[in-house]
Image: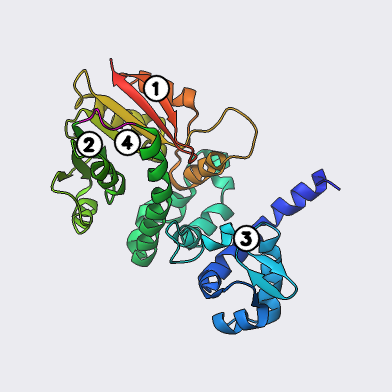
Amino acid sequence: MGETAFDTIQQLAAGHYLVAALEAVTDLQVADALEEDTPVAALAERVGANPDALDRTMRLLASHGIFARNAGTIAHTDASRLLRQDHPASMRPFVMMFAQEVHWRSAAELAHSLRTGEAVATRLYDGGLWGYFEAHPDHERQFGEAMQAKARAQIEGILASHDFSPYRRIVDVGGGQGHLLRAVLEKHDQAEGVLFDVPAVVEAARKHAAPERLEYVPGSFFEKVPEGDAIVLMEILHDWPDEEASRILQTVRAAVPADARLLVIETEVPEDEDVHWSKLLDIIMLAQFASRQRTREQYRSLLEANGFLVSGVTDTGRDISVIEARPV
């Protein structure tokens, strides 16, 4: 029997308990403690959980493909393995980031954003999300780890699908810890890289091992960015409403020669009504920054309004696209 309309609303209305279950087993490091076909009682003892409560929680998660449950034992699935700390593509930091107070409270008061178009986080915390992180440095570290975890999978798809070989000087604007840029330089030894971000981020990025061809430049992308024949904006524009996003693009436009390329790397919102990560992320951006995910056409319009013409779009296969644009 298929899911009815009643079932759909019922599941969504109580869906935060599913999220809480995922966060709870991740916090207890159940995935790390699990060996194949482990009895529930033994697993509960390892992680310090009540056996009955753990079994019922695993039953819920298993119904969504996270862990497998059979005859009193628990086993891994591909999804549950991503919760392990030692998995090369571990999503544990990503799960724990969304368990933070700032996300639960912002979600609980989302109606404020619906009524006003304003960010909930700014209403809840002085300085919004970044102010929250200043007051909770452990959560800021967790946020950084989550972004790294997400970026690892994305970068693999970006390097496999987009050709960086034509570029000699690649400037990663708002490049954070430099994971994308270092990966590009490792693959393309003809290129030099410039990691550009605010001073505190650049200083932290210097601590990571990097090739000599990587230069660190602190600054603000609202004021001036270094010149290059390829400028990368990876998940920068989605942090900002159109007005501020336009200011960033105008700053970039002033720094690029006529034969340069701008690479906007973002999760595009597809023009359909199917379930897609971008549509959930769009509401997260609304709640946290009063910003948005954009459709391909919206990116095209935004770029054209600020001196760029889209020359190509590459689907990386990782829910993220590389939008290539040239200055006009």
Mark 1 to mark 3 CA distance (whole Å): 37 Å
Task: Look at discs 3 and 4 and give the one toward the viewer.
Answer: 3
Task: Look at discs 3 and 2 and give the one toward the viewer.
Answer: 3
The kind of residue tagged 1 is Gly
- Residue 286 appears at what percent x and percent y? 49, 42
**Extent of the magenta region:** 163-167
Residue 66 is labelled as 3
Mark 1 to mark 2 CA distance (whole Å): 19 Å
Of marks 1 and 4, which one's residue comes earlier in the chain? 4
Task: Look at discs 1 and 2 and give the one toward the viewer.
Answer: 1
Mark 3 to mark 2 CA distance (whole Å): 39 Å
Of marks 1 and 2, which one's residue comes earlier in the chain? 2
Q: Residues within 10 Å of mark 4 (few under 14, many from 20)?
A: many
Q: Is residue 240 visible?
A: no
Residue at image coords 65%, 82%: 50
- Name the image quarter holding residue 89: bottom left
